[in-house]
Amino acid sequence: MAQLTVRSLIKRFDGLTALNNFNLDVDEGEIVGIIGPNGSGKTTFFNVLSGMYPADGGEVFFDNHSENLLNLKTHQIIGLGIARTFQIQRPFNNLSVLENLMIGGHCRTQAGLFSALINSASARKEREQLKARAREVMALFGNRLRSVEMNPAWTLSYANRRRLEIARALVSDGKLLLIDEPTAGMNPAESLQLAQTIQAINKKGMAVLVIEHDMKFIKKLCPRVVALDYGQKIVEGTYAEVRSHPKVIEAYLGRD
Ligand code: ADP
Ligand code: MG
């Protein structure tokens, strides 16, 4: 059985159907690329899957939990192990890289925000654990984040902001990572390096769903690719199968 099962997912915005009976299965440990022209519903899928927007229909099951994920709140979905990044990033700009990552890990720890703020022994211990976890995640990005860990997030380069965003999703120690356009603003060398980082994350046991426009990146990273148009899956298969499929070519020609 698939780790993630999406059935007939529907999301409407006023008159517009952003997701129109969308179906998807993702197996444990898979990396799946999601492509499609602008406005085809890719980000909306992540928004609904992560509980940010209510769905208008459908079912989502994850990891043998019997409950439809669409009935859960965002923090419960994160608790099940689904972590995400945002197409538009929103780090805490005045906090350091390290602090941003420690906050990202916080929702999975015992003591809770209140006791983390007060200076109890258990809170101190928890902070040390969060720091260790943050550094472990930073190590996945070589020296890129580690070398700036004390700098406020607003000083980061665009590429480092993307890395921070992914790292922040990772500290919560999930099972499925949703990444939305991670290479935006990166040069080809940085994109290639990021693909390797995501492969390393995947090897540690995390399934990855990645939305991306950069086809070189998708080709390198994703053994399976799903193409959307008008909120529906139009084709899925290997990169080669999907990229050359007439329906996919038509979708891109028709709209971009
Ligand atoms: P993609 O990520 O594939 O470019 P989106 O999922 O962002 O596309 O958008 C799909 C469609 O839903 C678009 O027509 C977009 O304008 C619309 N849409 C997305 N989010 C909202 C929203 N919050 N309110 C109204 N319409 C939205
Ligand atoms: Mg998008």
Image: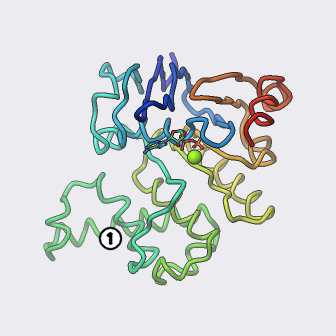
- Looking at the picture, does residue 48 appear above or below residue 9? below
Answer with the quarter of the image where residue 49 lies: top left
Residue at image location 78% in from the left, 44% down from the top? 215
Local packing at callout 1 (Cα closer than 10 Å; few below 14, some 14-19, many 20+) is: few
Residue drawn at x 54%, y 20% as measured from the top left: 23
**Does the closest atom of ligand 2 sit within 8 Å of the Cβ of label 1?**
no
Q: Say which residue label 1 marks.
A: 128
Up the image or down, 209 lies above or below 150; here it is: above
Quarter of the image containing the C terminus?
top right
Amino acid type at circle 1 is Glu
- Residue 216: x and y in percent read 81, 47
Q: Nearer the viewer, residue 221 or 239?
A: 239
Quadrant of res 92 = bottom left
SS of the residue under disc 1: helix
Left or right for 251, reference 113 = right
Q: Residue at x 36, y 39 (%)?
A: 53
Q: Measured from the top left, where is residue 205 in percent x and y?
A: 55, 40
Please tell me in which quadrant of the rendered image residue 227 appears.
Answer: top right
